[in-house]
Image (cartoon, rainbow, N blue to C red):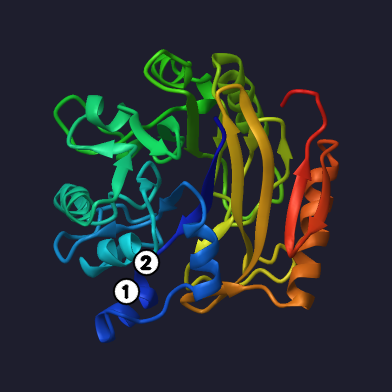
Amino acid sequence: MTATVALAGDTMLGRQVASALKVDPAAPLVAPDVAECAAAADAFVLNLECCISDRGARYPDPRKAFFFRAPPVAAQRLAELGVDAVSLANNHTLDYGPVALLDTLAHLDAAGVASVGAGPDEATARAPRVLRCGDLRLRLVALSDHPAAYAAAPDRPGIAYADLDEGLPQWAREAAAPGPDVDAVLVTPHWGPNMVPGPIPSVRRAADALVAAGATLIAGHSAHVFHGAVPGVLFDLGDFLDDYAIHRDLRNDLGLLWLVDLDGNGTRAIRALPLALDYCSTRRANPSEAETILGLLRRRCAAFGTEVTTSDGLFELVPATAGA
């Protein structure tokens, strides 16, 4: 049995994206051909880098610069886009406090979008979700290595936090391990710093540990730019939708929609559709932009011995056989 999962990185529906949705709840956020590509997969999973609520107050941290909150209609827009599940284990889910986090869970559930990586208590936040992906039963596991202040506790809402400087926690190892209840395991960590072109040592070590635990695929995010890949590991998916300032060298305005073929034995193919992230909307990259993305992806993959080829407008990654 082989199935295809579409993966997108940081998807930020707050700030000016939220303003666009408030003015026009049907505002086009993703171009139709990009949406069609994602819809052709058996499941679509992304990292939702905001809360969804019209309530709450900003988290009281004077050092925090950015707070992201989307209006309730955002959950329905994700469902319309064909999103099956989102990770909430990141550094913006609790931006407007526990009430907004609980609203986020409720709005997503009402829209039919599964969530993983956050919850009303620690056990729920850490709990995996099983998602039907074609004929595969796919277990989703989410965690974030920042911020510690957002960590769920036994009696407090929050995210599935893991201090990766201390190593991969046992609960994450157990969640990543294969079992008779599922055919494959997808781990989606929010790890490492923003705006770096490759994974830092703690991320590399955590990736090794997750592979050793038996995860079928690790698909990370946080850097806002896509990284290279090794067998079973996409270190960073890059961004999918936002209103962020553009870094002229790292080009966080260029992204990828990832399409990964899985079966019970691992990944069978990794392809990616090149994207251009305009201000508050995302479209397929034009030929010039795609060429730039290809060059960046090849350079970022070269350090891992991973080759990148092209076919029918998609990029295909051919990892070396060595581990992470």
The residue lying furthest to the bottom in this view is: 23
Mark 1 secondary-structure assignment = helix
Rendered location of residue 65, percent (x, y): 41, 61
Q: Quadrant of residue 154?
A: top left
Screen quadrant of the C terminus: top right
Q: Is residue 225 above or below residue 174?
A: below
The residue under label 2 is 13
The residue under label 1 is 18
Rendered location of residue 220, percent (x, y): 55, 41
Q: Does the CB distance between marks 1 and 2 fall below 8 Å?
A: yes
Q: CA distance from mark 1 to mark 2?
A: 6 Å
- Name the residue at 57% across, 34% down: 2
Q: Please give left or right for residue 10 compared with residue 296 in the image.
A: left
Q: Is residue 185 above or below residue 38?
A: above
Q: Please, what is the three-letter code of the amino acid marked with disc 2?
A: Leu
- Name the residue at 39% across, 58% down: 82
Judge by depth and name the residue closer to the eye, 133 or 115: 133
Mark 2 secondary-structure assignment = loop
